[in-house]
Image (cartoon, rainbow, N blue to C red):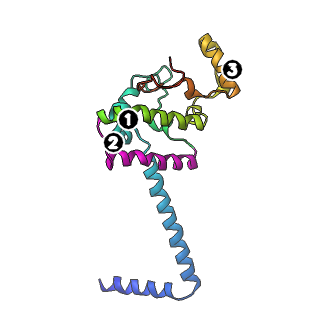
Amino acid sequence: MKWIINALKGFWSILRRPSKAAVGIVLFMGFAGGLMFWGAFNTGMEATNTEEFCSGCHAPIVAEIRETIHYANRSGVRAICSDCHVPHAWTDKIIRKVQASKELFAYFVTQTINTPEKFKERRGHLAEREWARMKKNDSLECRNCHNFDYMDFSEQSPRSVRQHSTALASGEKTCVDCHKGIAHKLPDMHQVEGWN
């Protein structure tokens, strides 16, 4: 035990002296600390992008996607919550995570969406907010997988071809304008503009 104390004292005396070794050690420790912080931060970010994490609070909502083409389809490509609700670019992802912290606050602190009944009551508001966010970013999350340039119009219905080749191609509309509820059951839509 005494040798550990002596080693720490010796290490401390090296750091206190203005020498190249002390500067090198401090720089190395800062670099190593930065790497460890970055690794832990990135691991935490990825842990909050899993379906298991989302279903901790949104189990009924996560279950809804299992009934859609985004969960099981002929190609075997599966989208999970974060594919549609978290941008892939790092800076956009950080901004979205900060925005989503309001949901954690609403779930755990104010408890306004912590039961299925409370969530259902607020679902319309939450959906409107998410649609507005996706419209503002030109449905970025949709476009991470669906690329207009590679759409095969011969595989689409005539109505889809008409909409995709005009409104979507011109930028007049974005994916979420027509594809609300593509992976979730829609909330009460009677007050949503343009909904028939």
Name the disc covering residue 112, or none.
Answer: 2
Q: Nearer the viewer, residue 184 or 5?
A: 184
Q: Residue at x 31, y 45 (%)?
A: 111
Report the mark closest to the observer, 3 or 2. Answer: 2
Q: Secondary structure at mark 1?
A: helix
Q: Nearer the viewer, residue 59 or 151?
A: 59
Q: How many marks overall?
A: 3
Q: Specify the segment rendered in magenta.
A: 89-116
**Residue 80 can be seen in this image:** no
- Predominant SS along the magenta part: helix
Amino acid type at circle 1 is Arg
- Residues at discs 1 and 3 in contact (Cβ within 8 Å): no
Q: Nearer the viewer, residue 51 or 170?
A: 170
Label 1 Cα neighbours within 10 Å, binned few <14 / some 14-19 / many ≥20: some
Q: CA distance from mark 1 to mark 2?
A: 8 Å
Up the image or down, 129 lies above or below 106; here it is above
Residue sticking out furthest to the top: 158
Q: Residue at x 52, y 50 (%)?
A: 94
**Disc 1: which residue:** 122
Instruction: Give percent across and percent down for residue 133.
Output: 54, 38
Up the image or down, 6 lies above or below 116; here it is below
Instruction: Give percent across and percent down for residue 48.
Output: 42, 46
**Disc 3: which residue:** 166
Report the mark closest to the observer, 1 or 3. Answer: 1
Q: Nearer the viewer, residue 120 or 58?
A: 120
Q: CA distance from mark 1 to mark 3?
A: 34 Å
Q: Secondary structure at mark 2?
A: loop
Q: Is residue 192 left or right of residue 151?
A: left
